[in-house]
Image (spheres, rainbow, N blue to C red):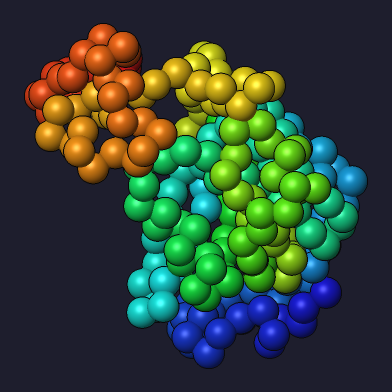
Amino acid sequence: MPTADEFYTESQRAFQKDHDSFKLANAVVDAIVSDDLDDKQTAFVESRDFFFLSTVNGHGEPSVSYKGGPVGVVRVVSPTQLVFPNYDGNGMFYSMGNTAETGKVGLLFIDFETPNRLRIQGDASISKEPAFVDRFPGANMVVKVDITSVFVNCARYIHKHQRLETSKYVPDEKGEQPFPAWKRIEAIQDALPAKDQGRAGSEGGTISFDDYEDHVAKGTS
């Protein structure tokens, strides 16, 4: 378990002193921060079908993205390690590139209905080991995270939202998923990976970018 001085940076400490929360910050670390998952936290992580992933590139620039999948999209391998998949995307491999470059990630899990949230920091690496990738049909790689800190956050500012349905684009048990509308945009046809070349014709034909924006606005993308 990290000590308060190990957990906080000098800048964070300065703000704590300015706002008379130095002692409180120490108490919070002692009360809620650990370097492994307990049984309750493990159950919460594996009950989620999405999370927010923060990464940092080689220039020190942070990024955050939404990662969705089936319930259990993140699997707990042990109290100190978890793994999650990377699915087909827009070809940027932004989060994966950042992860491979710096190996530093943050994961935020939220239940908007309760509400509840859990934060995890860790050292990450990319893996294509079948033992891990095969756990997630449709994944092209996985991220393994060695946990450095985990803690529950106060939920008082989380607005309550109701879950409606699972995205139709989550890969099924065979790893198959519908062809997304953005891959039908006429202007990008020549740039699509080989596996997607020519598919637009059998998926309703090509569309303009304005057509795609209409799909997004209607929630049919």
Q: Tell me residue 127's x, y (percent).
A: 66, 58
**Residue sitting nearer the eye, 138 or 160:** 138
Could one spot residue 84 in this view of the protein?
yes
Residue 110 against residue 28 in the figure, above or below? above
Residue 218 against residue 68 in the figure, above or below? above
Could one spot residue 20 in this view of the protein?
no
Q: How many marks?
A: 0
What residue do we see at 66% from left, 54% from top?
A: 128
What residue do we see at 47% from left, 38% from top?
A: 88
Q: Tell me residue 20's x, y (percent).
A: 54, 79
What residue do we see at 66% from left, 70% from top?
A: 123
**Residue sitting nearer the eye, 134 or 50:** 134
What residue do we see at 66% from left, 31% from top?
A: 137
**Residue sitting nearer the eye, 144 or 176:** 176
Q: Tell me residue 150's x, y (percent).
A: 72, 61
In this rendering, position of residue 128 left or right of residue 12: right
For the C terminus, give its image quadrant.
top left
For the N terminus, give its image quadrant.
bottom right
Looking at the rendering, which quadrant does residue 47 occupy? top right
**Residue sitting nearer the eye, 129 or 47:** 129
Looking at the rendering, which quadrant does residue 183 occupy? top left
